[in-house]
Image (cartoon, coloured by chain):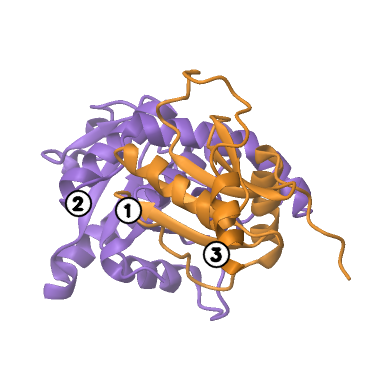
Chain colours: A purple, B orange
Amino acid sequence: MASASKQVFVNCPFDPGYKPMFDALVFAITDLGFGPRSSREEDDSGEIRLAKILRIIEECKYGVHDLSAVQLDSVNHLPRFNMPLELGLFLGCKKYGGDAQSQKATLIFDSEEHRHQIFISDLAGNDIHAHNDDIATAIRELRTWFATASKRRGLPGGSDIHERYLRFQADLSAICATARLRPDDVTFTELRQMIADWLNRNR
Amino acid sequence: MAKSNKDASVKRSIATEVIFAPGENIPAKTRTVYVVPRGDGWAVQRQGGGSIRTHATQRDAIKEARSEVKIQSSGQIVVYGRDGQIRERNTYKMPPIQNPPGKRSAKIEKAVDKVTRDRLGADPLPPRG
């Protein structure tokens, strides 16, 4: 497993409408040489969801949080609060987790640049990155942010990553068919391995 | 005798086949250079269908793949054996991919290999004995 300094907590929605963006962010994080983590990853510990989230947050230096799904649900007319909750846990871990956690770095996405001021004004002063629900924009923003936050040189460019993501998407149905998996049933753990294996052969 | 065989091998390895025309438009963003088995030899191929040359020996094919990738600012070499397994993989000036935590799925790895090899037109795997 990647060391904590290369692990990234991906705090994003899991609904089908967001899946292309989620897959693209996981792909881009992997292509940049970091290890994406998610509360959706499988393990054998049987721990409850919140305990699992807390453990993963503690193990990750970086957090990528997307607040774009914080909007009224068409059925229940209530907003989704999982992403803001987990963002708060990540920021709290950085603040109160001692020296080991103080180096955490946080990237916050939203669909629009100033939308968060309406529903989570306490984030005022933080740099919110707007992806405009556009995958190419999200990848470019993510890459630029990682170059600054990690201070690593030689990271691939955003357009290179996006081009590879499109090629990966073109291969994905054939990979699933060969592995006898239905694309809709691919788990986060399986997707993460597919991306890593594909990049190791097709960068 | 061994020396003459080696010499013959070296002569055969010099650009024996060019399938794509020189100067063709190779996508600038594609950076993997492959060595795959083809016929009796070993083909050097760029990601995206760039120039292919075949060599009689895998060693010479790897040598050419290395010089191809070093011309680029960054990239990687992937060498497939006749058994469909990756024999060598080297990354140049690109961050290495982190191994995902937890158990690995052999069927996913095989599927990614098959799709990649099929796209490259590598020889099919020999039947299981």
The x, y position of residue B51, in whole percent, is 54, 30
Question: Which mark is on residue A152?
Answer: 2
Determine contact: label 1, label 2, CB under 8 Å: yes
Instruction: Name the quadrant containing residue B31.
Output: top left
Instruction: Name the quadrant containing residue A95.
Output: bottom left
Task: Indicate left or right for A78 with B93 as reference.
Answer: right
Secondary structure found at label 1: loop
Return the chain for callout 2. Answer: A
**Within-10-Å neighbours for mark 2: few <14, some 14–19, many 20+:** few
Q: In front here: A84 or B11?
A: B11
Return the chain for callout 3. Answer: B
The x, y position of residue A49, in whole percent, is 49, 68
Give amino acid for label 3: Lys
The x, y position of residue B98, in whole percent, is 41, 62
Q: Which residue is identified by label 3?
A: B3
Secondary structure found at label 2: loop
Tell me if residue B104 comes above or below residue B111 in the rendering. below
Task: Indicate left or right for B21 with A130 as reference.
Answer: right
Determine contact: label 3, label 1, CB under 8 Å: no
> Are labels 3 and 2 on one chain?
no
Q: CA distance from mark 3 to mark 1?
A: 41 Å
**Within-10-Å neighbours for mark 3: few <14, some 14–19, many 20+:** few
Give amino acid for label 2: Arg
The x, y position of residue A183, in whole percent, is 70, 45
Q: N-terminal of the two: label 3 or label 1?
A: 3
Q: Which residue is identified by label 1?
A: B95
